[in-house]
Amino acid sequence: MVHDLTGQRFGRLVALRDVGRNKTSRVLWLCQCDCGNEITLSSNRLLHPQGTKSCGCLRREVSSQKATKHGHAGERIYKIWSDMKKRCNNPNHKNYNHYGGRGIIVCEAWNDFPAFYEDMHPTYKEGLTIDRRDNNGNYEPGNCRWITPQEQLHNYSRNVFITINGETDTVLHMCEKHNANYDRVVREIKKGMPPDKALKKYKINS
């Protein structure tokens, strides 16, 4: 059942009209922000209790204020937090389709870096990357942990499915079937290279 959100307010946003569906068949809504900008969001990002509440202006205002106070703007953990939000909130980000484009969001509390730092810094070590235990879950406390880049690649290969010539399987299994170097294939796919090209490029000569 499609809920009519026309005229409803979500934080600084007011839903104007239904403008179609995204790749996962979720209804897309054109919204007007109080600052004057318009933004298109899926219904789940509006209805989720920790979903999007502005076109990005609220987040920028808060981040700008906090960045001058928390003293971590130059640290790697701050960049991880910033990149995490871009993947989920910026449609122009190269990996948006794998995150925000399929409904993955950053919880409302973690739009504030100090809250993210308080939750995640105690277990953080240099060189680790952020990972979601549930690949379909959001970036939020309880679903995130720190793992090594090698573990990240393994999880990606094991959990993410790709389709080649009508056949669908995990990245890891596809690499085994096509005799390709899966570490390199995964890196290229995450950078945006089509899976079939990545498999062909890193095929291991027997």
Image (tube, rainbow, N blue to C red):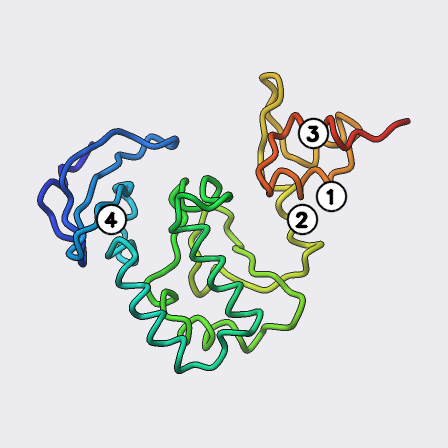
- Find the distance from the CA under tag 4 to the CA under tag 3: 36 Å
Which corner quadrant holds the C terminus?
A: top right
Mark earlier in primary sequence (2, 1): 2
In the drawing, does residue 188 fall left or right of residue 84? right
For image coordinates 53% across by 55% down, the residue present is 133
Q: Residues within 10 Å of mark 3 (few under 14, many from 20)?
A: many
- Find the distance from the CA under tag 1 to the CA under tag 3: 12 Å
Q: Are marks 4 and 2 in contact (CB under 8 Å)?
A: no
In the drawing, does residue 60 fall left or right of residue 117? left
In the rendered image of this protein, does residue 132 appear above or below residue 116?
above
Amino acid type shown at disc 2: Leu
The mark closer to the camera, 1 or 3, is 1
Mark 1 — residue? 183
Of helix, strand and loop, which one carries label 2?
helix
Q: Position of residue 123 (x, y in %)?
A: 58, 74
Which corner quadrant holds the N terminus?
A: top left
Q: Are marks 2 and 3 in contact (CB under 8 Å)?
A: no
- Find the distance from the CA under tag 4 to the CA under tag 2: 31 Å
Amino acid type shown at disc 4: Leu
Of helix, strand and loop, which one carries label 4?
helix
Q: How many marks?
A: 4
Mark 2 — residue? 153
For residue 46, which numbered disc appears in the image? Answer: 4
Mark earlier in primary sequence (4, 2): 4
- Find the distance from the CA under tag 4 to the CA under tag 1: 36 Å
Mark 3 — residue? 174
Q: Are marks 2 and 1 in contact (CB under 8 Å)?
A: yes
- Find the distance from the CA under tag 2 to the CA under tag 1: 7 Å
